[in-house]
């Protein structure tokens, strides 16, 4: 089946999702008892590449759902996911051509969640997350309130000051939008968390904006630009902004002096805080090697069992 580039709400989606969506909107958040969900994408990865993500998540005691879209996954990675209780959903990027795989994942996230909505198994909370460069140090949902939570990459840098983010915005929306959003902070599309209703609303807006992109934008990594457009244009309600290091520690813009590893192997912020989620740790070779040495023997032991 070929993906059709149209806004999300069509007569077909209204007929299939409209009624359960209305029911969800009128159900108080406190009455939703389904477990939370961690949702991500893995493509062309082996077990060693995804071990830090899945093993650290389970080590926190998190016992909610974990679902990963998979494409061309190596056999040892499939074994690891099965052994750690991760559900996999087959993902064919070609179905969403011409979209880059990082852009296409958002369409499939929405398809997956609306299917769960129709089935009556909509999760109470959802974390949309990158996988290869994410490690967990506590249950990711602990201490996070309602609404849609977005996490800043840096407390100082702005979208217009980062050459990469500025280029993405120009490619997707042109110079006028890049200038409009230049003074806003950089929020990361690699970790987004929300209650059921704002999570769905966020995905629908991501879908709507993605569907309008040119081929030149669709074929590049555009989701970061689209995410910041949705967030800073306030296309959804109940947004909560988090500073870097308050819940998610995103390390791309953090210097070597900005993190440390304690005697128990925990990654700490300069004020000693142990963030539940650490993202982009591989930007620091020393930290990436420490994590590799921690998890590679565990994968080898699992494979030998």
Image (cartoon, helix red, strand yellow):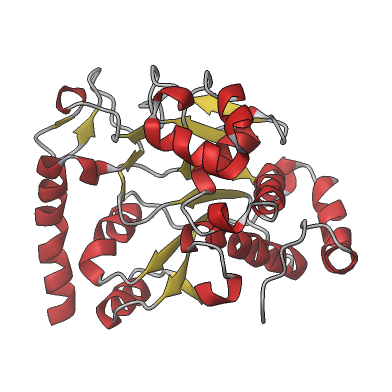
Query: What is the quadrant of residue 251 in the picture?
Result: top left
Q: Residue at x 48, y 58 (%)?
A: 102
In the picture, the quarter occupied by the N terminus is bottom right
Q: Position of residue 108 (x, y in %)?
A: 60, 65
Q: Is residue 90 above or below residue 149?
A: below
Q: Residue at x 65, y 60 (%)?
A: 110
Q: Is residue 232 above or below residue 197?
A: above
Observer able to see residue 142: no
Q: Position of residue 152 (x, y in %)?
A: 45, 29
Observer able to see residue 49: yes
Relative to 178, 110 lies left or right: right
Front one among 140 and 208: 208
Relative to 80, 162 lies left or right: right
Front one among 140 and 207: 207
Q: Position of residue 227 (x, y in %)?
A: 57, 41
Front one among 304 and 280: 280
Q: Position of residue 285 (x, y in %)?
A: 13, 44
Q: Residue at x 25, y 17 (%)?
A: 271
In the picture, the quarter occupied by the C terminus is bottom left
Count the marks: how many?
A: 0
């Amino acid at each position: 089946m070929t993906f059709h580039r149209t806004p999300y709400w069509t007569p077909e989606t209204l007929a299939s999702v409209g009624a359960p969506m209305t029911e969800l909107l009128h159900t108080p958040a406190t009455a939703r008892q389904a477990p939370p969900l961690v949702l991500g994408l893995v493509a062309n990865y082996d077990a060693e590449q995804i071990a830090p993500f899945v093993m650290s998540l389970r080590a926190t005691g998190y016992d909610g759902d974990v679902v990963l879209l998979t494409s061309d996954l190596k056999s040892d990675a499939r074994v690891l996911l099965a052994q750690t209780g991760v559900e996999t959903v087959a993902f064919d990027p070609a179905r969403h051509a011409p979209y880059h795989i990082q852009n296409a994942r958002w369409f499939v996230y929405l398809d997956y969640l609306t299917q769960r909505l129709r089935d009556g198994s909509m999760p109470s909370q959802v974390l949309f997350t990158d996988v290869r460069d994410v490690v967990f140090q506590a249950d990711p949902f602990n201490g996070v309130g309602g609404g849609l939570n977005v996490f800043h990459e840096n407390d100082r840098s702005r979208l217009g000051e980062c050459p990469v983010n500025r280029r993405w915005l120009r490619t997707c929306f042109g110079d006028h939008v890049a200038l409009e959003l230049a003074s806003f902070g950089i929020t990361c599309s690699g970790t987004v968390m929300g209650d059921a209703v704002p999570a769905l609303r966020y995905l629908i807006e991501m879908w709507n904006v993605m569907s309008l992109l040119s081929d030149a934008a669709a074929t590049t990594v555009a989701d970061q630009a689209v995410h910041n457009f949705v967030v800073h244009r306030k296309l959804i309600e109940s947004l909560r902004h988090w500073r870097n290091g308050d819940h998610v520690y995103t390390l791309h813009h953090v210097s070597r002096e900005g993190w440390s590893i304690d005697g128990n192997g925990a990654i700490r912020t300069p004020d000693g805080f142990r963030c539940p989620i650490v993202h982009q740790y591989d930007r620091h070779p020393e930290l990436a090697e420490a994590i590799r040495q921690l998890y590679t023997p565990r994968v080898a032991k699992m494979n030998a069992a």
